[in-house]
Amino acid sequence: MVSVYDVPADALIEDVADRLADRIEEPDWIEFAKTGQTRELPPEQDDFWHVRAASLLRKVAKEGPIGVDRLSTEYGGRKRGSTRYRVSGNSSAPGSKKIIRTALQQLEEEGLVETAKGQGRRITSEGQSFLDNAADDVLADLDRPELERYA
């Protein structure tokens, strides 16, 4: 059986995002929200919400149980110091926790993710089979000879 670990992440996330487009809906406020303190503008992708939810589902499957705080660190970025005189050095800043929390709540309503008391979120058996089916389809569509051994 093909799993999340056997296919390239970008191809899997793209396929899962297409599947999630029918199951979850994008909130109204997402066109105005930034993805973190380090960004100046909201995301410009049309399917940003579904791609982020697919990426979160994959991360929870690989690293779960994982909490919103740790996920926001993973989706964060570099925050530069002062622009004129460089008063402070570069540091890192977390990503938007509201985007992560809302997407995880939608995935939880669909039964793909569940809350582990005091530990964060983890994938359910339905979510794991959802990802495995997507990985199987992605592997069948890929035309890469180095991945033949997983088929």
Image (spheres, rainbow, N blue to C red):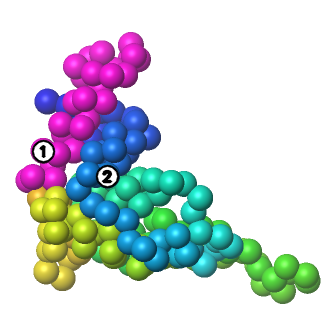
Residue at the spot of label 2: 21
Q: Crowding near pointer 1: few (<14 within 10 Å), some, many (20+)?
A: some
Numbered disc 2: secondary structure = loop
Q: Position of residue 81 (x, y in %)?
A: 77, 79
Viewer-side residue, 95 vs 89: 95
Compute the Cα span from label 1 to label 2: 18 Å
Left-right relation of 132 to 18:
left
Q: Position of residue 4 (x, y in %)?
A: 27, 41
Q: Residue furthest bottom?
A: 87
Q: What residue do we see at 27% from left, 21% from top?
A: 140
Q: Nearer the viewer, residue 73 or 104?
A: 104
| Circle 1 SS class | helix
Tag 2: amino acid: Ala
Quarter of the picture containing the N terminus is: top left
Instruction: Name the residue: 22% across, 44% down.
Output: 131
Question: Is 11 located above or below residue 109 in the figure?
Answer: above
Residue type indicated by callout 1: Ser
Q: Is residue 26 left or right of residue 109?
A: right
Residue at the (59%, 69%) spot, across then down:
42
Which of the 4 quarters of the picture holds residue 119? bottom left
Q: Is residue 80 left or right of residue 114?
A: right
Residue 60 shows in this picture = no
- Image quadrant containing the C terminus: top left
Residue of label 1 = 129
- Stretch of the chain drawn in magenta: 125-151
Are the two marked residues, 1 and 2, in contact with CB atoms closer than 8 angstroms?
no
Q: Is residue 78 magenta?
A: no
Residue 53, given in percent of the width and then of the height, sits at 35, 59
